[in-house]
Amino acid sequence: MRSTGAISSAQLHELEADIRDELARIERSLAHEASDEALLTADGTSLRVAPGFGTDAGLTVTLTGRVHARHMELSEALRRITDGRYGVCGHCGAAIAYGRLLVVPEATTCLECR
């Protein structure tokens, strides 16, 4: 098992705060999106249009899907922090480098296993 060095407690707290901040930003964005006018798709489901994107439904669905996926990934990262599994590669078990976690806080693999 490779080791790049575990993150410190201070680094973990910093990363957790960053994740919580990003989750709050995403939730504000989703709440704002929910307040925009709804369009109805051909099957009758509601579709929200992000400001500046007009009625390009495909782009809106793609962007909204990515936002929801990122929210889920960050929420799972918080669960890993709580469970003590955060910062450990899910493939090889090595510590994920702090620099990688700063850039991709939801990372579940080290750079070598990526």
Image (cartoon, rainbow, N blue to C red):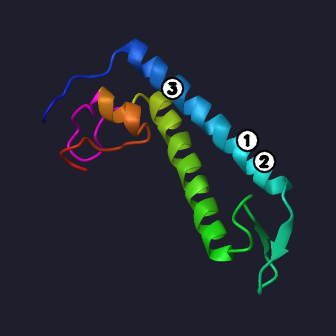
User: Looking at the image, is mark 3 or mark 1 nearer the viewer?
Assistant: 1
Residue 73: image location, x then y, percent: 50, 47
Q: CA distance from mark 3 to mark 1?
A: 18 Å
Q: Secondary structure at mark 2?
A: helix
Q: Is residue 58 left or right of residue 86?
A: right
Q: Establish if 49 lies above or below 43.
A: above
Could you classify mark 1 by the number of other residues whose Cα lies within 10 Å: few (under 14), some (14-19), or many (20 or more)? few
List the residue tagged with mark 2.
Answer: 31
Q: Establish if 71 lies above or below 4.
A: below
Look at 81% across and 55% down and name the residue there: 34
Q: Nearer the viewer, residue 78 or 66?
A: 66
Look at 39% across and 36% down and name the residue there: 103
Magenta-highlighted residues: 86-97
Q: Is residue 28 magenta?
A: no
Mark 1: amino acid: Arg
Q: Which mark is residue 98?
A: none
Q: CA distance from mark 2 to mark 1?
A: 5 Å
Residue 80: image location, x then y, percent: 45, 35
Helix, strand or loop for the magenta stretch, by majority: loop
Could you classify mark 2 by the number of other residues whose Cα lies within 10 Å: few (under 14), some (14-19), or many (20 or more)? few
Contact between labelled residues 1 and 2, with CB atoms less than 8 Å apart: yes
Look at 20% across and 43% down and name the residue there: 92
Q: Secondary structure at mark 1?
A: helix
**Residue 38 picture quarter:** bottom right
List the residue tagged with mark 3.
Answer: 16
Q: Is residue 85 visible in the rendered structure shown here?
A: no
